[in-house]
Amino acid sequence: MAHARYKQLVDRLADDIRSGRLRPGTLLPTHRKLAAREGIALVTATRVYAELQAMGLVSGETGRGTFVKEPLPRGQGTDMHAMSADMVDLSFNYPSLPGQADLLRAALRQLAATGDLEALLRYQPHGGRAHERAIVARHLARQGLPASAETVLLVSGALHGLATTAMGLLEPGDVVAADALTYPGFKLVAETQRLELVPIPSAGQGPDLDALAALCRRRRVRAVYTMPTLHNPLGWVISATRRRDLVAIARRHGLILIEDAAYAFLAERAPPPLAALAPETTVHVSGLSKSVATGLRVGFVCAPDPWIAKLERVIRATTWNTPATMTAIACGWLEDGTAARLEKEKRRDAARRQRLAADVLGGLKTIGHPNSYFLWLPLAPEVRADAIAMALSRERISVSTAEPFSTSAQVPHALRLALGSVDLTRLERSLETVARVVADQTC
């Protein structure tokens, strides 16, 4: 049997198990029956079941046969599951720096001493209080965005900003172009809003714009979801030339550009954001979860003035307003320079972690940005990502496979390693384990 066909059988059975077509507890054909049904050698059938067992999808019981197991959460990268204290989390990023708790303590004291606490207990305007919208607009203007208090809305984190954009500007069934590997949160937004995500392949440091243009000629594409500055999970920063080309396609075909800048603070000297190049058709979404603290659920949406009322109505329908205590702390840190200082320190921290990963994983191919909190690890053709994830789980390390990030039918076998959630000592030990497990599976 050809090597490719053998792997296709493994992938087909794995997909049947994950999709529920083969339910947990199902007794699979014997090795001999599988070999006869698929026209393969008995030894190959045995190897197929061995791979599925290594992936945690089946279990072999002596004298009883091979049974479907309850699979692990797909890719471990879409939903956050409770973990035991001894589990090292390399699947989610929640970077924090020493002393941040003291900053919060001081901010709460200052708010209690000088803030209008009565005002914080009342309902707020849906898009945020006017003076706080102005503070955020000045923050975005320093990043090159043509923002004003009238075109800025405060939301409960960047993901809420993406959901607000989808709910306010798109309709169920709309076609949205997205990178073939993209942010799992937006995939979930598209799923809940019944949008059709169509993958755009990558071409070096960015999406294949020829493929996007061809798609727009074939289909009525409504929007493009993109992360031009520090893409998650691949870490690219799209060049100024390609940004202008993307804007030209958007204008030619009447596309909404949804610009996700959640990690943009990590990339120094990046080209201007899309919202600066095409403010009339771009919704720019960012926030403070990654740059300041993941628990500070404050995000920003900067959109063309004609769209603001639609977006405000969605905020009313989903949260009414972002909690005023959170926005007061966030805007205080934007004004006094705390947020800018934390962004600078986190760029240095992320760079240290990337250098550490490069030293430990030097023998493996990796893709990333030198200031990023994550790393993409493509696997050799004969290595199955789920098998690696299962083996690492037994070593008490949680990682993400490509599945949560993929918008294509063909999911690449790769891992995304989140580098920002554990201290440097544990990170080094965990990456050494990753390197060993991948090497063992490759042999």
Image: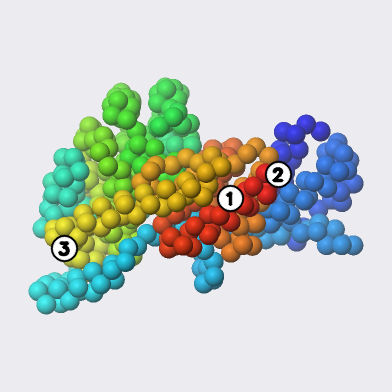
Give the CA separation, mark 1 to mark 2: 12 Å
Q: Residues within 10 Å of mark 1 (few under 14, many from 20)?
A: some
Its colouring scheme is rainbow
**In the figure, 378 relative to 311: above or below?**
above
> Which residue corresponds to mark 2?
443
Circles 1 and 2 in contact, beta carbons < 8 Å:
no
Q: How many marks?
A: 3
- Toward which corner of the image does residue 307 lie, by quadrant? top left
Query: Can residue 207 be seen here?
Result: yes
Image quadrant where one finds the C terminus: top right
Residue 173, horizontal then vertical, whole percent: 44, 40
Which residue does the image show at 64% across and 62% down from the upper left?
394
Q: Which residue sits at x=50%, y=41%? A: 366
Quarter of the figure with the N terminus: top right
Residue 82 spot, x, y in % from top left: 51, 68
* Sequence order check, earlier mark of 1 and 2: 1
On the picture, is 53 further left or further right than 153? right
**Residue position marked by numbered label 3 in the rendering:** 332
Q: Mark 1 or 3 closer to N-term? A: 3
Where disc 1 sits, the SS reads: helix
**Of tags 3 and 2, which is closer to the observer?**
2
Residue 279 found in image quarter: top left
Where is residue 381 shown, x and y percent of the image? 65, 37
Q: Which residue occupies the foreground of this view, 190 or 237?
A: 237
Residue under the image location 58 percent in, 50 percent down = 435
Residue type, mark 1 in image: Ala
What residue sits right under mark 1 in the picture? 435
Mark 2 belongs to which amino acid?
Cys
Q: Amino acid at mark 3?
A: Gly
